[in-house]
Image (cartoon, coloured by chain):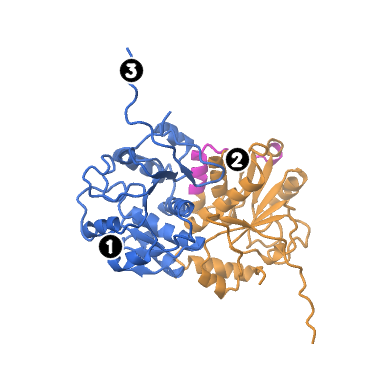
Chain colours: A blue, B orange
Amino acid sequence: MAIRYLTARLAQQIDEELMNAAGAFSIDQLMELAGLACAQTLSKVYDKKKYPRVLVCCGPGNQGGDGLVAARHLSQFGYQPKIYLPKPGSKDLYKRLQTQCANMGIPTVNDLPSALPSSDVILDAIFGFSFKPPVRAPFDTDLPLLSSSGLPILSVDIPSGWDVERGNAEKIGLNPDVLISLTAPKLGVKDFKGRHFLGGRFVSKRSEEKFNLNLPEYPGYEQIVELTTPMPDHEPELKL
Amino acid sequence: MAIRYLTARLAQQIDEELMNAAGAFSIDQLMELAGLACAQTLSKVYDKKKYPRVLVCCGPGNQGGDGLVAARHLSQFGYQPKIYLPKPGSKDLYKRLQTQCANMGIPTVNDLPSALPSSDVILDAIFGFSFKPPVRAPFDTDLPLLSSSGLPILSVDIPSGWDVERGNAEKIGLNPDVLISLTAPKLGVKDFKGRHFLGGRFVSKRSEEKFNLNLPEYPGYEQIVELTTPMPDHEPELKL
């Protein structure tokens, strides 16, 4: 059985199931594990000796929160992260995550063009699975800047600018080298050609079965697993 | 510089610094990372093929919460944990952690004598660094039962029944095979002879320096690090 690629609606449903009264997870818990998985994926692919300077680009929502958690863990791993968050989130958790980063001595940069030349790799945590086009300012100018920087990009869950179901059909999104899907991959990344990891090892067997996720087995106590090449788009035709 | 062993007062101070307004960590975040580190340590030492049945013994406080988080992660890792918590905590977080375990299909056992023969290893998350003797019911009878079971024991932070500074001086505590200290080891375990790990990779460099913790380097993106043999108790005498 192949892994299931989620529609926007299903991704939303699974998140709600995790966090409702029955699921009982707090957003603090889930974001901590998600952000840790993002940082570990970056660390697995981009060695800190060769790529020490990580530019963590955060949107205003939960995706940006994952980025802030990842920045903190990257700092613990010995990287030199910087945070670019032109539209900080207004939630209390978002602000606390910013404070935690500041306590780690992680700088915030305000000017993207001047930050790019002193970065080795980009962690893209701008838009998540609830993104709907068009891309609004300042991200409408930021995405092309990130794309043209020539730096390697690791995107969280869905590359920024992609539709969660139709992918980069409108050609306005980033083209990351690496992707970490959270909980389960989304429909829009089914044809993603780069290295593809999965994180968010907190879905119960019960939920996995309920939603037919067919998640792969994570190795040992790892919080991330690399997915093998996606299945071909079209099933072989049925012979009647 | 040797790692610093913490007094009860200092351990309390560091926890407060992490969670106060300036530190900005929520207990949900810290407990998630601490419990994950506990589960990873158990997984590192006790192979799930040989020791699948983990009896997670939880006290009513934050130590018990770490145990509940660990039980959930152990279930994700493919172990078959059971929870023994004769005095469940009353905090909302504690209850949510219990629900998360129930959602994973992790059973709770009520009778320790009958649970022990069907267990392969014990995760001791009963008492933490705020424990003060005497051991009260039902743990006064539980600790001797755990000790005499002959099962391997992994203790969290401080073996249950030990004084955080004086160790097992009163001989009423468990004698674990493995210990995972959280944040930094406590004074009472300075002479611990078993395998000793450290978890809680969330202390900022700033706090580490402020409290002279001299923490070891964690490898790569790991959340745990094995400590080498503790330093001898007595410094060489100063020659005047």
x then y, percent, for residue A140: 21, 57
Other-residue count near label 2 (Cα within 10 Å), few / some / many at <14 / 14–19 / ≥20: many
Q: CA distance from mark 2 to mark 1?
A: 43 Å
x then y, percent, for residue B153: 70, 48
Q: Quadrant of residue B173?
A: bottom right
State the residue position of label 2: B81
Side of B193 where B86 appears, left or right: left
* Callout 2 secondary element: loop
Number of the label disc, if any, that sits on residue A116: none
Other-residue count near label 1 (Cα within 10 Å), few / some / many at <14 / 14–19 / ≥20: some
Front in this rendered view, residue A231 or B13: A231
Q: CA distance from mark 2 to mark 3?
A: 44 Å
Side of B178 where A126 appears, left or right: left
Number of the label disc, if any, that sits on residue A238: 3
Check if mark 2 and mark 1 are on a common chain: no
Front in this rendered view, residue B130 or A135: A135
Question: What amino acid is at disc 1?
Answer: Lys
Q: Quadrant of residue A10?
A: top left
Tell me the quarter of the image containing the C terminus of chain B: bottom right
Q: Residue at the location (41% across, 43% down)?
A: A183
Tell me the quarter of the image containing the N terminus of chain B: bottom right
Number of the label disc, if any, that sits on residue A87: 1
The magenta span reads: B96-114
Is the residue A86 above or below the residue B144 in the image? below
Q: Residue at the location (69% across, 60% down)?
A: B228
* Callout 1 secondary element: loop
* Callout 3 secondary element: loop
Pair 1/3: label in front: 3
Q: Residue at the location (67% across, 55% down)?
A: B179
| Callout 1: chain | A
x then y, percent, for residue A170: 21, 45
